[in-house]
């Protein structure tokens, strides 16, 4: 979820979504609220896609790399950085 710098695991059998990682600051939380309000209203929101939305990361989380079996998961799209998450 690039807007909230969050990784959510969805259980397709139950439809339950669980947040497993999130970077947030009071400023990014306020921006996420503004974006969500604009989305509900069908209004543009890209003006809020600025560094305060994803800081302290070097960029928004835009992808994941899954290693085989029970290996780690890496969040990507963070400039030159990867975030390693153990399963």
Image (cartoon, rainbow, N blue to C red):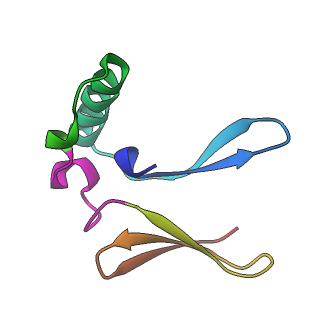
Q: Is residue 85 left or right of residue 2?
A: right
Q: Position of residue 51 (x, y in %)?
A: 17, 55
The span picked out in magenta is 49-60
Query: Foreground: 66 or 18?
Result: 66
* Vertical arrangement, residue 37 with respect to residue 9, above or below: above
Residue at 72%, 79% (x, y): give it: 71
Q: Is residue 20 left or right of residue 62?
A: right
* Vertical arrangement, residue 13 with respect to residue 52, above or below: above
How many discs appear?
0
Q: Quadrant of the C terminus?
A: bottom right
Residue furthest right as drawn:
13
Residue at 26%, 60% (x, y): give it: 56
Residue at 35%, 79% (x, y): give it: 81
* Vertical arrangement, residue 29 with respect to residue 2, above or below: above
Q: Position of residue 75 (x, y in %)?
A: 49, 69
The main secondary structure of the magenta stretch is loop
Q: Position of residue 40 (x, y in %)?
A: 37, 20
Residue at 25%, 68% (x, y): give it: 58
Q: Is residue 21 left or right of residue 86?
A: left
């Amino acid at each position: 979820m690039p807007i909230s710098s969050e990784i959510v695991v969805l259980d397709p059998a139950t439809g339950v979504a669980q947040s497993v990682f999130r970077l947030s600051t009071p400023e990014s939380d306020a921006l996420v609220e503004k974006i969500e309000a604009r989305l509900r209203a069908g209004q543009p929101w890209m003006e809020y896609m600025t560094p305060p939305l994803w800081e302290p990361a070097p960029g928004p989380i835009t992808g994941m790399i899954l290693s085989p079996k029970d290996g780690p998961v890496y969040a990507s799209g963070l400039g030159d950085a990867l975030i390693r998450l153990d399963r």
